[in-house]
């Protein structure tokens, strides 16, 4: 195996390691998100109640949108801190606020997509709504909101990983040569093959 292939293999291993750590942090974020959601659901109005009507449509801003967004914000902050210190090891390379804002923006983009998916999973006339005869809200394991939130988290997480690796924690790549831009790393290795 040549140096270029070895560098490519090393880069893929490093990315898989980052993805694994990001996944572990994400799993802890799912727990934080769901605990927050359960707490809000128990303390607040019924999750299907409308907060604000959206014009002449069949759709409303509902309490489950509010609960999901608050749960996202709590989990987002927890995930950011863990990713900053453990996954990407960037805490010594950039200021907290400088990395948090892109992380929050990426998360808010994911949350916007997630709210649309959540609405489709919860709305009774949606083609992908969870069936109310199975998810009748009779127990925690049969709660439509909890299952919808878990499905949304599972679908949005891969996009979040890619955007955070590329944008939010970019300062790490600039501070550590071993985490340099893969294209520049490959070009450097290609140049060393010539000499």
Image (cartoon, rainbow, N blue to C red):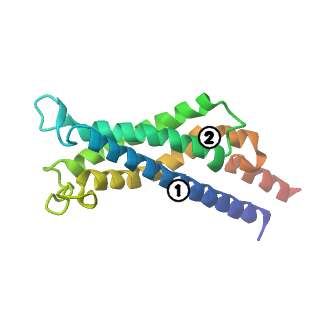
Q: Name the residue furthest right.
A: 195
Q: Which residue has dot 2 on it?
A: 169
Which residue is painted at 62% across and 50% down in the image?
87
Along the horizontal axis of the image, is 30 left or right of 152?
Answer: right
Viewer can see residue 11 = yes
Q: Nearer the observer, disc 2 or disc 1?
A: 1
Q: Which residue has dot 1 on it?
A: 23
Specify the quadrant of the image occupied by residue 63.
top left
Which quadrant of the figure contains the N terminus? bottom right
Which quadrant of the figure contains the C terminus? bottom right
For marks 2 and 1, the one nearer the N-term is 1
C-alpha distance separating marks 2 and 1:
16 Å
Viewer can see residue 112 = no
Which residue is painted at 21% across and 57% down in the image?
130
The secondary structure type at the circle numbered 1 is: helix
Label 1 Cα neighbours within 10 Å, binned few <14 / some 14-19 / many ≥20: some
Reply above or below: 52 against 34. above
Q: Name the residue furthest bottom.
A: 1
x, y percentage for residue 14?
67, 58
Which residue is painted at 71% across and 48% down in the image?
179
Along the horizontal axis of the image, is 63 left or right of 180?
Answer: left
Which residue is painted at 61% across and 55% down in the image?
18
The secondary structure type at the circle numbered 2 is: loop
x, y percentage for residue 152?
35, 51
Front in this rendered view, residue 57 or 82: 82
Along the horizontal axis of the image, is 122 left or right of 114?
Answer: left
Reply above or below: 169 against 183. above
x, y percentage for residue 101?
53, 31
Mark number, residue 9: none
x, y percentage for residue 122?
21, 49
């Amino acid at each position: 195996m040549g140096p270029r292939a070895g560098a490519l293999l090393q880069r893929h291993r490093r990315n898989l390691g980052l993805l694994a750590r990001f996944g572990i942090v994400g799993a802890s974020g799912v727990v934080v998100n769901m605990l927050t959601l359960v707490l809000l659901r128990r303390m607040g109005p019924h999750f299907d109640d409308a907060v604000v009507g959206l014009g002449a449509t069949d759709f409303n801003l509902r309490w489950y949108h509010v609960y999901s967004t608050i749960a996202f914000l709590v989990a987002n902050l927890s995930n950011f801190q863990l990713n900053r210190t453990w996954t990407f090891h960037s805490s010594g390379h950039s200021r907290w606020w400088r990395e948090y804002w892109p992380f929050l923006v990426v998360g808010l983009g994911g949350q916007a997509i997630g709210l649309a998916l959540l609405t489709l999973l919860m709305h009774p006339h949606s083609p992908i709504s969870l069936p109310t005869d199975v998810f009748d809200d009779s127990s925690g394991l049969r709660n439509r909101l909890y299952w919808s939130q878990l499905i949304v988290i599972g679908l949005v997480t891969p996009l979040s990983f890619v955007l955070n690796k590329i944008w939010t924690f970019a300062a790490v790549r600039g501070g550590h040569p071993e985490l340099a831009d893969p294209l520049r790393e490959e070009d450097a290795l290609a140049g060393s093959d010539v000499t």
